[in-house]
Amino acid sequence: MGYNREDFVRIKAEYSEKYRRAREKADERRFELYGRIPEVKDIDSVLSGTGLEIMRIISSGKKDTEAAVEALKARNEELLARRGALLVANGYSADYSDVKYECEKCGDTGYVGTKMCECMKKALVLAGYESSGLGGLIRTQSFENFSLEYYRGGGASYENMEMFVGALKRFASDFDANTYRNYLLLGSTGLGKTHLSTAVAKKVIERGYDVLYVSAVGMIGDFEARRFGTGAGDGSVRGTERYYEADLLIIDDLGTEVVNQFTVSCLYDVINSRINNRKCTFINTNLSRKEIEDKYTERITSRLFGEYYPLPFAGTDIRRQKRMK
């Protein structure tokens, strides 16, 4: 799927507007010069007719067309030099009336030839951060500031976490249109599930893919809003299409939502549809395997433990460890 569709349409429109504004402002500066330095207008009038002059030379059928074109180029160079000197003499920079693009590389079109410019890629990544639902987490939680030191002394928990972090880094770094793998992050609160999920989301967004991060309560709220015209959504999502279409969906805090026939049906539909369409999904939960089995239907639990790689987090609440320092 690539970049979020709505983000792409919006950013493309912003680039079209930037391109239009840059040229409009250049025109305003040019007309200002015409009012103050009439000779500049005369020079521009001659220069603007260059294309027609070249066509007349070529269509004339004369043998010396190449020499005539070269003479025309030399004349234009002299005119441009004269134009620049006039501007400087009147207190302007020589390029005062040139179009000033924010990105000279792509001329504010977003593309260099047929390839997307780096500036547009960056704009889409930043837009992806905003539309992901991660909010401020994207700025504070990454692989770079995730520390394994809080798991030392826990024996197997340190070794497991080292393995989990490595697997998630590889998943995020290698993510592409063909990636298909689901993860179920289990464990009590404060063990780094949200931090690592955010780190994965950040890296996948930077690779140019659409990520949606939402709490289980928020997701169910969006489905309630669609079905009943009201709901308890967290406001980060409009509609429910992206639950099915996003390249990576991360559902946080599974088990905190009210569980009833409607909510279980919504959860099953999202999980099952994404499995069938080979869309990657992460689910974070404080519930144990037995609690998940007791809370949800067999159809959901069989898919979670049959189609997802379980990563059981263990250790001591990191927030508590930080407070104790």
Image: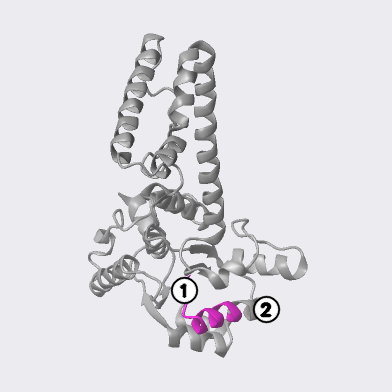
Which element carries disc 1, helix, strand or loop?
strand
Above or below: residue 88 compared with residue 11: above
* Residue 28 visible in the current orientation: yes
N-term-proximal mark, 2 vs 1 = 2
Residue 260's disc number: 2
Residue 183: x and y in percent read 41, 76
Q: Which residues are magenta?
A: 268-287
Residue ID at (44%, 39%): 56
Give the Cα distance between marks 2 and 1.
22 Å
Q: Nearer the viewer, mark 2 or mark 1?
A: 1
Q: Residues within 10 Å of mark 1 (few under 14, many from 20)?
A: many
* Residue 101 visible in the current orientation: no
Query: Left or right: where does residue 258 sit relative to residue 196?
Result: right
Above or below: residue 39 compared with residue 169: above
Magenta stretch contains residue 143: no
Could you tell me the amino acid type at mark 1?
Thr
Check if mark 2's residue and mark 1's residue have beta carbons within 8 Å. Answer: no
Q: 267 or 32, which lies in front?
A: 32
Residue 158: x and y in percent read 25, 69
Where is residue 141, by image quadrant?
bottom left
Residue 83's disc number: none
Which element carries disc 2, helix, strand or loop?
loop
Could you tell me the amino acid type at mark 2?
Asn
**Residue lying at the far right of the rendered structure:** 229
Residue ID at (50%, 40%): 19
Colour mode? one colour
| Count of numbered badges drawn on the protein | 2
Residue 281's disc number: 1
Q: 307 or 46, which lies in front?
A: 46
Residue 296: x and y in percent read 57, 83
Q: Residues within 10 Å of mark 2 (few under 14, many from 20)?
A: few
